[in-house]
Every structure is written in structure tokens, then in C-alpha cells.
Amino acid sequence: MYGWRAKIALIIPENNVVMEHEFNKLAPEGVSIHSTRAYSNLKGIEKHREREEQLDDIAKKLIALKPTIVVYAIDSGSFYKGAGHDLNMAKKISDVVQVPAITTATSAVNAFKKLGISKISVVTPFEDEINIRLKQFMEGYGIQVLNTDRIRSYGSYGIPDINLGNVYQFVKEVTYQDAEGIYIGCTNLRTIQIIEYLEKDLAKTVISASQATIWNALKTADINDPISGYGKLLTFQ
Amino acid sequence: MYGWRAKIALIIPENNVVMEHEFNKLAPEGVSIHSTRAYSNLKGIEKHREREEQLDDIAKKLIALKPTIVVYAIDSGSFYKGAGHDLNMAKKISDVVQVPAITTATSAVNAFKKLGISKISVVTPFEDEINIRLKQFMEGYGIQVLNTDRIRSYGSYGIPDINLGNVYQFVKEVTYQDAEGIYIGCTNLRTIQIIEYLEKDLAKTVISASQATIWNALKTADINDPISGYGKLLTFQ
Amino acid sequence: MYGWRAKIALIIPENNVVMEHEFNKLAPEGVSIHSTRAYSNLKGIEKHREREEQLDDIAKKLIALKPTIVVYAIDSGSFYKGAGHDLNMAKKISDVVQVPAITTATSAVNAFKKLGISKISVVTPFEDEINIRLKQFMEGYGIQVLNTDRIRSYGSYGIPDINLGNVYQFVKEVTYQDAEGIYIGCTNLRTIQIIEYLEKDLAKTVISASQATIWNALKTADINDPISGYGKLLTFQ
Amino acid sequence: MYGWRAKIALIIPENNVVMEHEFNKLAPEGVSIHSTRAYSNLKGIEKHREREEQLDDIAKKLIALKPTIVVYAIDSGSFYKGAGHDLNMAKKISDVVQVPAITTATSAVNAFKKLGISKISVVTPFEDEINIRLKQFMEGYGIQVLNTDRIRSYGSYGIPDINLGNVYQFVKEVTYQDAEGIYIGCTNLRTIQIIEYLEKDLAKTVISASQATIWNALKTADINDPISGYGKLLTFQ
Amino acid sequence: MYGWRAKIALIIPENNVVMEHEFNKLAPEGVSIHSTRAYSNLKGIEKHREREEQLDDIAKKLIALKPTIVVYAIDSGSFYKGAGHDLNMAKKISDVVQVPAITTATSAVNAFKKLGISKISVVTPFEDEINIRLKQFMEGYGIQVLNTDRIRSYGSYGIPDINLGNVYQFVKEVTYQDAEGIYIGCTNLRTIQIIEYLEKDLAKTVISASQATIWNALKTADINDPISGYGKLLTFQ
Amino acid sequence: MYGWRAKIALIIPENNVVMEHEFNKLAPEGVSIHSTRAYSNLKGIEKHREREEQLDDIAKKLIALKPTIVVYAIDSGSFYKGAGHDLNMAKKISDVVQVPAITTATSAVNAFKKLGISKISVVTPFEDEINIRLKQFMEGYGIQVLNTDRIRSYGSYGIPDINLGNVYQFVKEVTYQDAEGIYIGCTNLRTIQIIEYLEKDLAKTVISASQATIWNALKTADINDPISGYGKLLTFQ
Amino acid sequence: MYGWRAKIALIIPENNVVMEHEFNKLAPEGVSIHSTRAYSNLKGIEKHREREEQLDDIAKKLIALKPTIVVYAIDSGSFYKGAGHDLNMAKKISDVVQVPAITTATSAVNAFKKLGISKISVVTPFEDEINIRLKQFMEGYGIQVLNTDRIRSYGSYGIPDINLGNVYQFVKEVTYQDAEGIYIGCTNLRTIQIIEYLEKDLAKTVISASQATIWNALKTADINDPISGYGKLLTFQ
Amino acid sequence: MYGWRAKIALIIPENNVVMEHEFNKLAPEGVSIHSTRAYSNLKGIEKHREREEQLDDIAKKLIALKPTIVVYAIDSGSFYKGAGHDLNMAKKISDVVQVPAITTATSAVNAFKKLGISKISVVTPFEDEINIRLKQFMEGYGIQVLNTDRIRSYGSYGIPDINLGNVYQFVKEVTYQDAEGIYIGCTNLRTIQIIEYLEKDLAKTVISASQATIWNALKTADINDPISGYGKLLTFQ
């Protein structure tokens, strides 16, 4: 029986190639991951609005899967309307599927709170408008954002093509001295393999969108295995 | 970069918990799996009709993912209208996404042809009507079906809960002496861990729905790693 | 020399397929397991009565084996007559073979006492009459039983066929919030592979019939190796 | 599910400490071993007669276990009445339990036939009368026995206490130059760890009672895994 | 003693970060790698001319190292003047240090000859003028070049930053159907980890600048260990 | 990307065969080593003077490499002019390349200070004049040198050919009882494999030239992985 | 270089097959073992007297080996004349070879002192006269001997043929409840593989002749590696 | 039981530190090595004469050990009197101990014959007089010696201190092009770790004194395990 401890239903954007791959890689024994996708071909905030409108419909279609929990793993899509809206989205899903639901943005906030971090630097591949909303969201939950910096992709390459080494170097350059922690946003950006190196080399706590999502999903499903090699958050039960 | 050799888009039914889990487990280095779901709450043939109506829409939503290939991994959904219809479905998807597409049913047929098998016993969890159509489909492609037997789930347990050991014993009991091979249908039934044991202990070739789908998907994406431990098909390049 | 540290004689019911397999799997270096069977084709309490009548005869036949200890590994057979009768049965065997003897039911009680647990939930595959007697037995030794719930097998499948995942989910559902520990009864039910997961995910101590029997047998034979991976009891020397 | 490929019921003498231990050690994935014991406190031939009288009774008690096959793993007990009687014993068991049955003595004969060996030296811990009957049995099946030599145990030590190194040296000393193979009798004598060394160092095929029993049991249950490290017989499918 | 089988002196360009790293990684037991650098801050062909003028001087400084061989591991720097000039450069070095010397360009040619390949596709990060000279060089040695395609780096990233996955995809796209082999030029481009995947997935032989250099250096130093995992060339002794 | 955490540029003498080999061996994930050489064919102090004159020129040529730091890994070359001159040399390099720079001699001093050692025995392969200057240098930084002893190479063998076992025995013989630590000088002498044995067997801290250089280089580049097996210094973060 | 940390010269009796084998097995990296033999064909005490007369001669012949230390590894031969004589024997050897020397009997005493044990049970294969002298020797050094029991070999088997399992069982049976430790004498009796099991199962410290000899030899040669798996003495630095 | 397959008695010179160490390292399961020493403080040929005079006496002292075979592992000591004398020495030992005996020199000859080699280069640390006798010995058995070259040790270092890397380089330099094989003489010179590298890099068969001795000893004792990693001779059964 796959997923004999927990079956986790994952709602991801139409173009995401990172989130389900990393969750499958890190899933403990007896936990299975089951994806479906929210779709939009609009840009910026409009994209999130369109995806959000599909919430009820997507949730309804997940009932037959009998998941243990549902995860809305769209980072900007869960913070773009400010603190509190993330919880509303989770509640909407939960009401339909009748199991607990969480979002990526809530997971990031909870992760920093769990580790006692309240002043952070932020790196994302998002455009400025989204980064401003991320700052507002975090600060709405009492986490001070010292700076937000955008890492870019070039040529025909997309966000998931960005080199892990380039993310490491970029984070190292833009992090503020007095930040207690670092948030690397976007569930479509690869991060999990460099979190431990950044934590060691900068001596700061590092939380990424996909890592926080995995941590919160497992905790919500009562799966309590520490996972080593991907940052202190996942070893912290 | 995940999926640096190939990104495989998987279309599965709303309630499937086996296919993406097994494909993630067997995927070679550099191959990533990306699922989306076709939805129906109807029964029997009607369920497949409803899912098939969504084909264009689902395919369109996969474009942004830039997959290397698309896989319609719904077993009965790809054979229920008979030989040839499986190819039409693949073509429809391919026309929209502009990359190669395959189906589970085609994969099973190709697997038997590749291994030179033309007389088989069949085990599935399907109701009789579907098993009759599976026989017609296989025979439409020149593969003689000696018998079809249905393995059942009990109580509140579903198809993915069926014990691997029970599948092994059931297959052993119902297989015909003069069958050259065995087909275990349904991408929502666990099979891959027992294929090698069945092949050794029965001295016959064993093909299952998810195994054949994985094999054909990799081959279509030009991924030529032999995979050992899951039946002779996957070691056969 | 097999069993150079200890040779353990195991008395099990005629239909048991779990106990000797698990004991062989967990036995430390230098410990060998030697089974014989008590037989009955009656039902319920009568079955245990018939098996018990064979005690002297079975014990006598074990003398030539020169075992270090003898284990009466029939769970309900050792508690069905209430607290104290388990010790009588052990004494009877011991008097014949002239080495120490223990029973499964005593082992479960000792395990909870060793770990300081006095309030438990109980899961077994037993019929109600037996579960009532198990509650009486436990409470006769001062261990409060909050609830007893029966896990069932279906169709032609027997108790040893029950999926480990189904046992895990069933235990998770029926355990009382205020239970300090959980007892999973019956030496013919598979449990040892899920004990650690249940302990982690429920944050409660879990004792099963076969695990407690193995622990008590080794301790009685002065074999003091901690065994990891099968619950905290076995790592506790 | 333990024994999901095969559940093997083992009938052994009351004092045997080797057979079930070695079979558990060598049993492939999905094969479980379930012992029961035939009892006698007589000596020599009388002992075997008394055990044989229990055959029907023991067999009846194995029905509830639903074994895949039954094994009468008493070496001298299966050859003492000459060629053919071994098959009768197996048939008697099979008639009761309604599954295939085999004996150790038949297994040894079949092993030599399988490997094309017809001239052997024999080492056992048996008294002379038994060794004479073993020679008659083997020759009744067309296998010439050049010599039979008895290995002894000393002081308070029994047959299972004999050092593997002493067995190796004894076999090396007494084997005839022109023997094609060697038989080491008695399922209560340890042998499996030295078979490969004897085969290498003497350049002759070596068959032992427990090894041949394991090989024939697996083959009869349609379990076809080669097992390496215990002599060429077990790698020979 | 490091380098007890061979000490290999490596001449690389001032900005190279790939060649010595890969050679250290692949060097067999007893082989040590010792780098020095040729310097130029000019562009294109002029850069190679300036570096070449330093040949005598660099070679003289390597004498004290007592290397087993010297390697001029600058790809375009060894082919830019056409077939034969590569051998002159090697001879010049050899005359000074009095040990054998080789160049990267010669190594690539020898690799194709060794494997019997005479029609190739070429991928490099070089500007067009250099690619034209590479084609002339190869054809001067009888190896037909079907096409040369340039892989680019973007933004502030340099050639060693190019993703291995992007090199794999680029090679897959531009290789000609009727090419027997592929050359991936430039010792400052990472390639060794994808060579085996390209060989499997394209079913063509793949040679890269650093791989060919390593192969030829070891062979020239009489080091004959096959190295597995980096393309068929290195397993070919 | 090689060197994605740090690219370390190494300036070594023309004849050094140890330093870059050991640094490559110990470099943590994501750290790459890039060597270039300072050249002299003079003797003794003159040799260091000649090499030092090339500092600016060598440093300028390293700019294109974009190293994270630069290491002047010439032991006597960095201490021969006394305490403070080592820092001047580092500053000169740093001014040209515009990244941090360090020297071997500074690294040794910092290592002893880090571990709180201020009284040492010294073993080097240097001639007496150099050893006197090493003592002056160390004492200029407040580290008392109890004795300096010279280990010799013989026949045609050079310093890198000296047996590790002979270094171990020599150090054991000449170390003063009241030394708190031991310094083994010269980046061209093999030491790293015996440091832990010397520390265990003499119960004193052991620092060698190459080990201290590696430690200081990683620390300066913000690489904070402990490295085990090469002395307590490298496990000390 | 073998023995680069220490070369240990071992003087053993003509018939010893255990001591050098076990020392070779446990010797840490860089320690080599070099045996020679003292010869006698007399019995009992006379045997030791004859061997002792050869001391000077054997010692003289060891000079050319340049050992780090010399070990007189004859158990009864080093205690038979009482406390103090063991030290005289060591001194005699040391005076000739001019390196430290030790004996087995001294090692056993030192081991018990090191671990703070002063009341012991003793098991040896020695005849009574020797056991009485062992008791006198131990008590001469302040270690109370509660009992001495003799383990026997049978038939044509010698002391080195005794089964490890039989030694374990014998020690378990004869050890006194109030003994703090156990001594298993004779460097020709196998013990090292069962020391940890005895220590765990009896909860007492166990010292054997060969183990104590190995421990003391390494300590005397300044080799300070803890060795795990052979009793607490060897992990105690 | 150590040496349960074979106990090998080794006669080595008083100063040998290599032979018993290497034999212990390579001895297969169940083979134990037991050394004793022949003594001389004379020089050259006189040394061998003096050691040879002790043959009878040493052999007599080995009887109590009950060895499977005896090995006279003194290289020059077994060839210095020419072809045939080696066999006489072995016979003398064998007559006393009453088990087979062999010498190093015979082993080398047999090794070359076994591998079909009849023209060799020779490297030893012996003085010229001994090398001349080695050549005569080999040619007495029909093996042509093209050249003999002496490898030296320096300073206070002895033959066993010579670096393996220096032996490798020396052999590479002096071997004749048309030699089919190479003999590296002296059981006190380390060689076994470089034999495979020399065989690969020179493409010639390499036999060393200790390797040939080990091979012949095992073969004579009927131990037929191939041993990999130490030259083709030991893998050749």
C-alpha cells in the first residue's frame, strides 16, 4: 500500500516542475504524493486570481482520492492578498474535501515562527509587484522583511533551470548582515540541495518555499520523521 | 535541473494513487514526472467517456510545462473503444501539445510485441464489461487472450489497497498453462514489486499496466537506461 | 553452533504463521528459535481449553531439545482465564522441562509495567468475548483498558493477511487521546514493522503481542542486546 | 504478508536444532517456514518407527496452516525402510493435507540425479546400522556408495555442537578419490557454511541433508531463486 | 608518494576552472595532476597566439617538477593553426622538458580514430571563427564535420556556469542523424557527467575536450586503468 | 558548476607535488582548487626572493579566474622575512585580485592560536638557515619553539618521496615532552594521513603546513564544513 | 611500510595457533605482528621451565627485527613462579633487545587494575596444578580469585578446537554471583569473539589472556586506538 | 577454529617483517599462518648456510603445531645452491614434520611455469653475488633471465622501508622490452600492492617472492580460492 501513513494531495500551477519532484524525493516511508494542477495563462496578479477561481472545482475532484490532507503549493498564489487570505483559501479547500488543508505561504510563516525568527532577507524570482506583496504578507504576520531581491533567469531558460550554485551565490551576496533568517520564495525554484550549505556558510536559518511546504504538510498529516540533509527546519520535530 | 533528460507529463484518473508514485520511484536520473488528472464521477464506460471529453482541455493546459512527452495513463480509458482508438487519443493530445503522446493500452500491446508474445492470460480488477473490451482490444492487435480473471478488493478497501502477495497468488492460480505471457491490467493496482517473482516462479513473461506505461514513456522520450528488478521488459533496450 | 547463547522453544497454535517468522527475523546472534504447535479445531474459548490440555504432553516432548527457556506464545490462550492463570501455565511447563517458561500475556503486562504505562487502548482481531477477557486480564494486573477495538479480515483472507498499512490506520483511528499506550494483541497479526511509525506519529508507546513475547523471552534467557527498529521496548534493556 | 510466495510446513524430530534455523536463514523473499515436531524417546530404528506412526496425526494438524507444501525433514526417518518408502511417506502426508509433500531422503537422491552424480562417499553422524540402510537406499535409486564414515560428537556435546571445521576436515580425510560427489547426512548436523569450501578444495560436488531438503522444498513450491554461497546445488535452477 | 605511477603536468588557460578539477576527479590511484597556466587578456585568435608565445618559458619552469608527461590542455589553442601544428606544439614542449607531451586537439582526433569514427557533429561554446578552424583541423585529419553549433552562456554567467542539462539538450537538438559521433569542444565547458547519458540516449559515440585529454594523457603515461561512468572512450584500453 | 561555493586560487612553487593534490582530496562539496606556480631555480633565501618578485604579475593573471580567495601556499616563502611580512604579501595579492588572500605561514600561526597552543616542537625538511627563520617567525607571533629538527630525504629521492611512516617515527623521536603542539612545516612534505595517528599516540596537537593552509583557506572563503580524519584542527569550526 | 607505527615481536609456545592470529586480526593500522616460538616437549611446570631457559637466546635473535616492543605471550609460563617473576622475565628480555617487554600474566593483572576489578572467577583449560598457581599469582597482586574452573577438550581435539559457544556456556555456568570480573586464561584458547556477549549477558567485566596481551602490548607501544567489538577493555584508553 | 581449512607453518629469517604480514592479509577464510624464525648474524652466502643448518631443528619444533604444510619462505636461502637444492630442503623438512613442505624459490619457478613464461627481467634488493645465483637457479629450471637489477635502500632505512612507488618506478625503468615476465625477489621487500598496477601498465606478468610463496602454499594445502587484487597469478586456479 502506497501512502499507508498519509496520502498528500498537491495543487500546483500548470507549469511547475519542482514541487512534486522534491516532495517525492523527500517523502518518508509510507507517504505518497498526488498532484493536480491549477491553470492560468494570464500574467502577474491576474494569473493567481484565475487559479484561485478554480479552487472549489479542483477540491471537489480530489474527494475520490481520499487524501489525508490537501496542499495548495502555489507560493505567490497563497500570499498575494495579504495575511489571513492564505487561511481562507485553506479553509475553502478543507470544507470541500473534508480533510485538513494548508498553503505554502502559511507554511513559510509557521516555519519562521517555529524556529523563532522574526527578521529576514528574502530572495525570489518574482517581479517587484509580487515581492512587495510578499513583504506585506510576512509583516502582516509579524516577520520583518529587511530586503527582497530578485534572482533572474536568462535567455530561453526558465526559473526551474536556474543553477543551484547561482542561487547559493545570489543569496550570499544579498543577505543582510542583521537578518536572522532567509526566505527563498517560489515552489518552482530549486533550493533544497543548497539549504544546508547556506545555513552552514552564512550561519543563518534558511527557509525555502518548497521546504516549508513539505515540512508543514508532513506535520499536518502527523508524520513525524526527522529528515536530514535539507536544512534545520526538517530535522526539527 | 530536474527533468534535464526528459520531463514526462502524466494524465491520470482523479482517484489514482499508484501510477505517479511508481513512475517517480523508477524514473532514471534526469527524468521528472509531472501529473495532472482527468475527472469523472460516473461509472463504467461512462466514466471513460467523460474523462475523454476533457482531453483537449487537459492537453492545452500542459503546454506551459514544456514536457518532453505526454502519457495518457488510464488503462481501460485507452482501450475501451477498441484497437486504433488508443492511437487516435494519443494523436489528439500530441496535436495540441506538439510533442509525442502515448497511452497505457498501446504500451501494453507494444510490450508484448517487443517480447514476441502473442498468447496471454489476463488479470485485472475491472468489472466484466471492461474485461471483455480489453480482450477485444488485445485481439484487435493480434494478441490472443486465453482468459480474463478479476481480482477483487473487499470491505472498505479499494484497488490500491490489494496486497501484493494476494495479486501474486491470484495470478499464479488463474494463469493458463499454455499462456506465453500474463497481463495485469489497471494503473491503479500495485504490481511492479512482484513482476520479477512471477516471471521466475511461473517461467512466463509478465507485463503490467504501470510497468508497460513506464517502459513505453521512457522509450518514446529516448531514455534508454535499463532498469533492473521490475521484470524483463524494463531491462530490454 | 546455532543457539550458542540461547535456544528458545516456542509453543504456537496450529495455524500461526507470524510468530516464529518474526522471532527468527529479530533473534540476536547466537539465539535460535525452535517451534512446536498446540492443536485445536474448536472455536473461541473451547479452542484454548483444548490447547491447554496438551500442555504437559507438549512440554515433555521439548525436553530432548534442551532449550534455554520455553515460550507459550498464544496470546488469548494465556489470558483467557484471567490474571494469574498465565503464571500457572508457565509454571506447569517449567515444572516439566525444568527451565524457565513464560507466556505472551504475561509478557505484555510486564512490558507496560517496565515502561511505566497504566492506561491503554487495545486493538485486536479477536471476537468480542475474547476482548472482554483481555480487558479483565489487563485490569487484573492494574492496567486500565480505555477501549478495545476489533480489526477485521475480509473475504477469504485470514488474520495474517491483514495489510500493515491497514493496521496502522486502524490503530490511529481508534486510539483514545488520553491513552498512554497501545496494545495490539494476537501473535498471528503482523505488527512489528509499524510499531516505530505508530510510536512516532501518535507519540504514544506501542506494545504488540509478538514484540512483547520476543522482548520477554530474550530477557528471561539473559540475552541483553538492544534491538532497534521495532519500538522502544526492544531498545530498552 | 509473510509467506506470500510460499508457506512451507516442516516436520522435524523433537530434538532437531539445525533444520528450521538453516531454512529460515536461506529462505528467499516471500517464503516462510513453519515447524512442527514428531516425537520419540526410543532409540535407533524404533525411534523412526514411532515417529512415522504419528504421520497422519501431524499432517491433519497442519491443514489449518494452509501450507504450500509439507516437508518431512527427518533424514534417516525417510530412508530407513529403503527406496520407495520415502515416496509412500510423502504421499500419505499429501493425501491428508492436500498439498504436495516431500522428504529429506528423496531430496538427496533428486539432488544427485539433477547434478548427474552416481558414485559418492557418505559422511553422517549415524550409527552403523543406519549407515548401512542409507547405502541400501541410495543404491536402490542407482547411486553407488563407495564408503560411509561416521563423524562423532564427544563428552556432553551433541550432534549439532560438532564444529564446522571438524566436519570439513573429516570429510576431506574420508572421501574416496574416485567419488564424484559427497553426501553429508542428518538434518541435525551443521553443514551449509562449509559446502562451498569443500566443493572448491576437493573439486567434488557436495550435498548435505539440510541443503538438499531446502533445495527440493523450494523447487516443489515453484520458488526459483538461485541462492549463492551454499553449494552449487542451490545456484542450479 | 603522490603520483607514484605518473605525475601529469597540465598547462591550462588563465581562466580555466574545469580541466584540473575533472582530471583530479578521474585520476586513477597513483596519478597526480599538477597545473600551471598560460596567460592572455587578448581576444579570439590573438589570445591563442599570445599564450603560445609563452610555451618555451612555461615548459622550462616545469622541469623541476619532474613530470611523467606534459599536457597542453587548451582546446582551440591547439587546433587554431590547423592539422600538424598541434604536433609541433607538443614537440616544442617535449624538447624542453624532455618527457612526452600532448595537446587537447590531438587527443580528440586520436579518440575518434581509436573508436573508428569519421563523421561527426560538433558542439562548442566558441565563436564562429574558431568553429570554422576546428572544422578545418578535424578534416585535416580526415574526420568529416557535418555541422558545428555554438552553445551560449547568458547574463553574467561564463562558460563553466552552463548547466549540464542544457548541454545535454543542446547536443540532442543539433546533432545530425547521420553523424557517427559527437565532439563537444572546450576544456572549460563541463561535460564528463553527461557523456554516458548522451551515448545511451542518442546511440552515438560522444567525445569531449576534457575527456579526450584525460584519456590521451593517461595512455601516454602508460596508465591503463579503465575508468567507468564517463563514456565508452575511457573504458576502452 | 564546479566551485559553486568557492573557487580557491593556489600559488605554489614550481616543484610542488603535494599541496594541490591534498587540497583537491580534502575540498568539500562545491569547492574547487585552481593552481598556478611561482618559479625560481635559485637556492635557499634567494629562491624565495625571486618568487616573491613575481607576486604582482601572478596575481594579475588570476583576475580572469574570478577566485573567491587567493592562497600563497609557499611555507618558507611566507615566513622567511619575519612576522608581519606574511600579512604584507597577502595584502599585495589582495590589492591586485580584489578578493581576500592568505599565506601558509599565517595559517600555521592562526591554527595554533585557534587551538590555544603556545609552546611547540618543529619538524621540517628545511636547511638550518630556514629553520632559524621559522623559529623567529613563530616567536614573533608569541609561539615558543622548543626545538626545530630536520627530516632528510636520501639518494635521488626528493622531499615528496619521504615515507609517511618515516615522518611519523621522526616526529615521535624529536618532539619535546613539554611541547603542547607540533608543527610539521613545508607544503611539499606529505603529512595529512598521519596527523590523527600522531595526535592520538603522542596526545599532542599536530599542525602541518598543508593542513593549516587548507583550514585557513576554507575558513576565509566562509566554507564551514568540518572535515574528519586529518587532525583536530579541521574538525574545529 | 608495514609496522610504521609499531612492530610487535611476539614470543609464543611451539604449539600456539590462536595468539598471533588474533593479534593480526585486531592490530590497528600501522601495527605489524612478528612471531617467534619457544619450544618444549615436556609436560606441566617442566615445560615452562624449559621454555624460560631459552629466553636470552630468543631475545638475542629478535634484535635484528628492530621491534618496538617484545611480548612474552605465554600465559602460564609468565605466572607459574608467582607475582614478580613475570616482571623479571620481561626485564630479562628488555635488557637484551633494549626495547620495552611485557608478559601475558602482567597484562591480565594490569587489565583488572585498570578497570578497578578485584574479585574474580577464573576459567582456563589448565590442569589443576597450574590453576592453583594462577590463583596464587593473581592474589599476589591483590586480586581475589573466587573459583577456578577447567574447561576441557575431548577426543583428538585440542584446546584451540574448543567451540566458542561452549566457552560461553561454561563461563556462564561456573561464574560466581559476587564476582566483579571473569578471567579466561590461556593464549591458545579462542575467546575474543564472545567477550562482548559475556559482558552483556552476565553484566560483568570479562578479560581473556589474548585480549589482555593485545591491550597491554598496544598501550606499551603508545598505540592508542580504541578497538570495538572485543570487550570493554579494548575500548578503554 | 582458526585454520580450520589449513594451518600454514612459515619459516622466515630473523629480520623479516613483510612475509607473515602479507600472508595474514591475504589468507582466505579458514586459513591461519604460524611463523617461526631461522637465525643468523653472518653476511651473504654464509648467512644462508647458517640458517640452513637449523632446518632439522626448526622442523622438529613444528610438529606439535600439527600444520597442514610447512613453508621455507627465505628467497635467496632457497635458491643459493642452485636448481634442485630447493627441493632437497623441502624434502628434509617434510621428512621431519610428515606433511608437505615448499620453498619460496620453487614457488617462483612454478608460478612462471604455470603461466607459461620463460623469459624474464629480475629486480631484487640483493647484492650482486646473490643475483648471479638467482639467475643460475632460474636458468637451471629453464627460465631465461635477461637482466638482474638491484633496488637499494638508503640512509638508516632497510629493505622493508622501500617505498612501493619507488619499486614500481624502478621495475618500470629496468624491465627489458622483450621480457615476458618480471620477477621481484626477496620476501622482505613489499610488492603485493603494486603487482596489478605493474601488470596493467607494462602489459607483462609480474611475480614477486611473497606472492609466489602465498600462491604455492595455498595450492599445496588444497585451498583453491581465487584472490583478487594482487596479480593474475593469485586469480589463476
Image: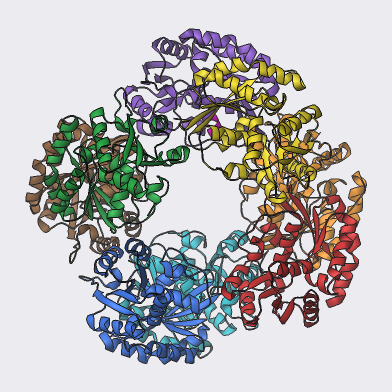
Chain colours: A brown, B green, C purple, D yellow, E blue, F cyan, G orange, H red
In the depicted structure, whether residue E141 falls above or below residue H39: below
**Residue name at image x 35 percent, y 48 percent:** B26
Q: Is residue H45 left or right of residue H192?
A: right
**Residue name at image x 34 percent, y 60 percent:** A201
Q: Position of residue A92 (x, y in %)?
A: 13, 35
Magenta stretch secondary structure, dominant: helix
**Residue name at image x 79 percent, y 29 percent:** D127
**Residue name at image x 54 percent, y 32 percent:** D220
In the depicted structure, whether residue B154 falls above or below residue A165: above
Residue E149 seen by the camera: yes
The magenta segment is C23-27
Residue G169 seen by the camera: no
Can you say which quadrant of the picture contains the N terminus of chain F? bottom left
Residue C128 falls in image quadrant: top left
Residue B126 falls in image quadrant: top left
Whether residue G157 is in magenta: the answer is no
Q: Position of residue D168 (x, y in %)?
A: 73, 43
Q: Position of residue D231 (x, y in %)?
A: 63, 44
Residue D207 falls in image quadrant: top right
Task: Report how many numbered discs are placed on residues in the image.
Answer: 0
Can you say which quadrant of the picture contains the C terminus of chain F? bottom left
The residue lying toward the viewer, choosing from F182 and C31, is C31
